[in-house]
Every structure is written in structure tokens, then in C-alpha cells.
Image (spheres, grey):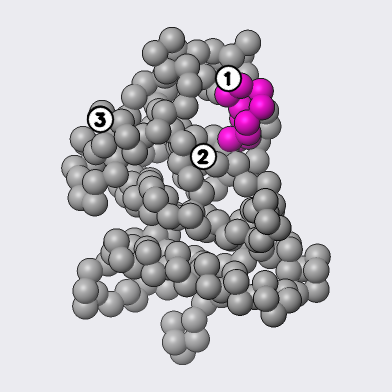
Amino acid sequence: MVVTNPSHSSKVDISNSDKSSILFKSQFDADDFFAAIRECPGVESGCIGPYRVLKKLGHGSFSTVLKGTLDGKEMVALKLISINLLKKSPKARLSLVREIRALKEHPNFVKIHDVFKTNDYICLVMEYIDGGELFNYVADNDGLSAFEAKDIFHQLVRAIKYMHSIDLVHRDLKLENILLLMSPKKRLLVKIIDFGLTRSIRDCDLLSTRCGSEEYTAPEIIL
């Protein structure tokens, strides 16, 4: 049985929520940001908040991602970030804030349906993408057609341009961090993920930290 809170028994469009409007301001105080996230029941009987957990999808440095459902029909991805980790790690706090800022309104980032917190976790309820990584698609199909390459590149440039417009740089863009979603018209839609190395930058800032994945590092960083 799904554990529910009567006042939060369905997904919330957080972009229209008065209490959560702080989540999408371009500038905000970190304490206000976390205070704005509503509370839900913790993990109980295979559920977290009102969502039933189906399986684990993966984990990273700061989070674990689960596949879940609210109504048994629509699938979602549940990204759990430890509150204890956020308290101990300013880097993890900044990573979460920047990820939510980047994801808020662009079609080439995984859409956030809801945000809530339990005693142990902050949970991002996200669009479930079942098309796999671009890396696997390229490997399985011996590359991309000219049309696919052009279309995917255009989507990536558009997404990067948006990130730069809000003073964010991804710093770990690679085939494994690009998910694919097949549209009803059989077009491959790109979804960029993993904002763990994302940082804010202002005009005239020069990034010099060597980070990301060696195989995708720009030559000027190595030389």
C-alpha cells in the first residue's frame, strides 16, 4: 500500500507552488531554500512519501536514484539525497541547488515533478527516462546517422546555452551523462543529467580546476 499524506497525495507542480517558489529564484539564501521544501513520510513498506519504490536505478557521489510510481501507471525517478550529507558538505548543497535551477524549465533536462523531504532524505521526483544513455545507443547502432548527429548536437548546444545564460557550467558533459527519450514522432530527445561538478560562473571568471572524465577532457586542459 502506498503511504500517503492526505494533503500531498498527488504530484505538485512546484513551479506554481507559493511555498516552493523560493526553489526557482535565480538567487536565494540556502537556508530559505531548504526550509521551503515540504515534509512527507519517510521510507515505509517499500514507499517514500506517497511514492511506491519499484527498484534501484543507480547511485552517485551524493545521491541514490530509484524507479517509483504514484498511481501504479506513471513511472517516475526518485532521486534521494541524504540530509546528513547535505549538512556536512557545502559542495553537495550547492550541487543540489544548481541542479534544481538548471532543471526548472528546459526541455533538454529531466523535468522535476515534485520536491519533498523526509527525516533522512531530500527527494527529487523526476521524469523517468527509459531510452538509456547516448553512449549505449551509439555503441549498439555503430554510430549515429547524419540526421541524428545534427539533431542531437543542436539540442545539446541549446541546453548548454541555457545553462550559461543562468551562469552555470556543467563540467562533465559526456555520452554517459546524456539520456535519450523517444518522442511520439520517433525523434530522439536529449536529456542531460549529473550536475555533481556543475558550478556557478560570472563574466570574466576563468575556470582552472581539472575535473570531469579524462576521456572527454578538452585538450587545452591537458596541455
Image quadrant assignment for residue 55: top right
Q: Earlier in the sequence, mark 3 or mark 1?
A: 3
Residue at x 50%, y 13% (from the top left corner) = 4
Q: Quick one: quadrant of the N terminus?
A: top right
Which residue was labeled with disc 1? Answer: 47
Mark 3 crowd level (few <14, some 14–19, many ≥20, 10 Å Cα): few
Q: Which residue is mark 3?
A: 18
The stretch of residues the image draws in magenta is 66-76
Residue 23 appears in the picture as rendered:
yes
Q: Quadrant of residue 87?
A: top left
- Up/down of 190 relative to 75, above or below: below
Local secondary structure at mark 3: loop
Q: Residue 58 location in percent, x, y?
A: 63, 43
Residue 74: assigned label = none
2 or 1: tag closer to the N-terminus: 1
Q: Is residue 200 above or below residue 215?
A: above
